[in-house]
Image (cartoon, helix red, strand yellow):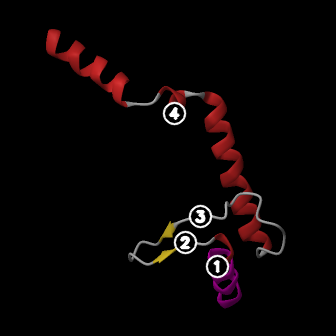
Amino acid sequence: MKPIAIVVVGLFRVVPRAALSGDREAAVRTAITAFYKAFDDGFVGPADFATEDWNHINPYGGAIRAAKQRLRRYAEFIKLS
C-alpha cells in the first residue's frame, strides 16, 4: 500500500494545480468553441481565439508559427473543400 501512496503523492506534485481548475477548463472550452465557429464561418471575422505567437504543428510535422499565416492557410483549406 505504501508504494501506491508514494505514486499518488508524486502525481499530485507533477500535475500543476492550475490544470485542475474548472475556470481554466472553461476558458479553454471557450477558445475551442470560438475556433470551430470561425472555421464554420470561413474565418471572415477577427480571430478571438488565437495569439500572435501561435505555433501550429500539423500531423505531418510541418510547422507554422504566426497566427495570421495559420489563419490564412485555414481559409485556403476551406475554399478548397
Farthest right residue in view: 45
Whole-percent x, y for residue 50 in the image: 68, 61
Q: Which residue is mark 1?
A: 69
Q: Which mark is residue 54?
A: 3
Q: At numbered mark 2, what does the secondary structure look like: helix, strand or loop?
A: loop
Asked if the residues shown at circle 4 and circle 1 are in contact, with their CB atoms under 8 angstroms apart, the answer is: no
Of the two numbered discs 2 and 4 in the rendering, the one whose residue sits closer to the viewer: 2
Q: Residues within 10 Å of mark 2 (few under 14, many from 20)?
A: few
**Amino acid type assigned to the residue bearing label 3 in the image:** Trp
Q: CA distance from mark 1 to mark 2?
A: 8 Å
Sequence-first tag of 1 and 3:
3
Query: On screen, 62 above or below 32?
Result: below
Residue positioned 28% across, 22% down in the render:
10
Q: Is residue 77 magenta?
A: yes
Q: Residues within 10 Å of mark 3 (few under 14, many from 20)?
A: some
Q: CA distance from mark 2 to mark 4?
A: 24 Å
Q: Which mark is residue 26?
A: none
Q: CA distance from mark 3 to mark 2?
A: 6 Å
Q: At numbered mark 3, what does the secondary structure look like: helix, strand or loop?
A: loop
Asked if the residues shown at circle 2 and circle 4 are in contact, with their CB atoms under 8 angstroms apart, the answer is: no
Residue positioned 84% across, 70% down in the render:
45
Whole-percent x, y for residue 53 in the image: 60, 63
Q: Which residue is mark 4?
A: 19
Q: CA distance from mark 1 to mark 3?
A: 10 Å
Asked if the residues shown at circle 3 and circle 2 are in contact, with their CB atoms under 8 angstroms apart, the answer is: yes
The answer to whether residue 1 of the structure is visible from this angle is no
Magenta span: helix, strand or loop, mainly? Answer: helix
Question: Which segment is the magenta one?
Answer: 69-81
**Amino acid type assigned to the residue bearing label 1 in the image:** Gln
